[in-house]
Amino acid sequence: MRRFRRDQPDSRSDDSDERTEDIGLEKLAALQESTDPEQPTWSPGGSAPNVMLADEADAVDGTTGEEQPRRRAPFLAGGTAVLQRNRTLWIVALAAALSLVAGLLLGRFIISPADAAASAEPPALGLVTVPVEYGPLSNDVTIRGEIAYSDPVEVRIDASGSAGPSVVTGQVPEEGTELEALSIALEVAGRPVIVLPGQLPAYRTLQVGVSGPDVVQFKTAMRTMGLDAGDPADNVFGADAARAVGTLYSQAGYSAPEGEEGSVDMVLAAEESVRSAEQTLLTAQGDLAATPVGATPVELREADNAIASARRELDAAQQESPPDPIRIADLVDALDLAALRRQEVGADRTDAPQRAAVEAALQQLTGTQEDLARAQEAALPSLPPGEVLFLTELPRRVDAVTATRGSILEGPAMTVSGASLGMTGSAAEADARLLKVDAAATFELPDGSPHKAKITSVAPGDGDSQRWDVELVPDPLTPEQILELQGSNVRVAIAVGATDGDVLSVPYAALTAGPGGQTRVEVSEGDPRDGDESPTRLVTVRSGLATSGAVEVTPVEGKLSEGDLVVVGR
């Protein structure tokens, strides 16, 4: 903006002064016409300070009304221009001033919480009360449980007895497959590995004549499958057990294992020996039947007649008179000779050699029959250890498979576990001793809903562990729930004591002892904020199940109901 000095005459200054005065007078006249004469006027931009009225201006500078227009006009025009050019600056300044004034006023009347608490007096002491609860009460032991398929074990198959390399040729199960009794776990070198229920692993070939607990296990497994392998109380593997092996393989769809090497030829040879011994016996028996033994009836009759004739002659000689002693003696000798001949008639004819031949033939036949039986037993099916897999608690779930078709079987073939989910956890000894088998437990499903479980085992930990192992089994789950829960860690609550239904309960701090040793609670009947002025009454109770936060109470003298306020402190 250009500045002009009045003490230096300039031709342009007069014109400028006249124009300025004209503009100022016009704006002043317009401003006075649009403004209440009782109120100060503002610049057209709304941001300029108050402009004095004409009378006020006269009083200030002491000029007359006629002289004032010429002296105020340049001042008003310049001020108006300045205000218009710096409107934003004036607005910001005015807002800052208003904010300052508002802050001072608010600071005068608003007090901070800390200042209010510092200046406030402490409240009057009152009764500390808790409402009586009504509902089931239980004392729980809480543990963390890992959810997984129960009892995982590695499956190793003894294929050492295989004639060739132990190549996996088929029947490789997929993960998630369930193995049951008579399932084929694997096929090695074209031979099956049959699943049977049992605890002892197969460690030797079961064949006729062996005995032991593994034989009892096999017979028991066969009985559970409806096959007769002999009495399980008999620990000897007999022909019945061997025949059961053949039936087992037939049901599995495979041929039974062959017996001992060369056993078939031994059976054939034994059968031929038996047939030969039977023919020999038949011949000996025929010879014995055809051989005459002793005297014939005619010869016996003749000998008897000779004895009778000699006796008659003797009797006749003894009756003659006088008797002839010599003749009588001769007749006596003749009678004795006839009797001796009678005894010896046929004595030279006997069947003793034929009878001996028959006895020898019988012994030979018996020997060959025993040989045949042994050969037949040797030819009966046996059960190799590499073709059977004993697993407990069937069915079992295949968790992982390491054997692949076409590979040589080495190390574990697969890992199997129980077909149902189980939970395993641990607890301190003090808590574990409170837990019992078949005790109920609860845990939360992924959707937050509770689910029940049952304890199956509580046992001290292995080695020097101070914690006990706890095993549980959850109630049946849906396949979707099993998929979500497998491998997760959940919080398990096990109730070691619970009330029979809903009961009244209060905190421990609410119980007090009466003068006679009875247990009491103090019930507030007024406003607890009144402190000792609030009326209360005493109720004698009998305590019951105690938990970590509350105790069951039953009123004995006085009334106690759900929602009553019991005093726990002052």
Image (cartoon, helix red, strand yellow):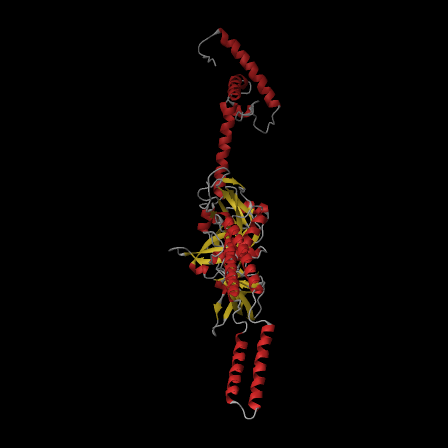
Measuring 54% from the left and 73% from the top, which residue is drawn there?
345
Q: Position of residue 564 (x, y in %)?
A: 57, 63
Q: Residue furthest top?
A: 11
Q: Between 163 and 99, which is closer to the camera in this rendering? A: 163
Measuring 52% from the left and 51% from the top, which residue is drawn there?
267
Q: Between 110 and 154, which is closer to the camera in this rendering? A: 154
Q: Position of residue 205 (x, y in %)?
A: 47, 51
Q: Is residue 88 visible?
A: yes
Q: How many marks?
A: 0
In this rendering, the answer to whether 92 lies above or below 333 is above
Q: Is residue 453 visible?
A: no
Q: Residue furthest left?
A: 464
Q: Position of residue 215 (x, y in %)?
A: 49, 57
Q: Residue furthest right?
A: 33
Side of 252 where 122 appears, left or right = left
Measuring 52% from the left and 74% from the top, which residue is drawn there?
344
Q: Between 373 and 400, which is closer to the camera in this rendering? A: 373
Q: Position of residue 208 (x, y in %)?
A: 49, 55
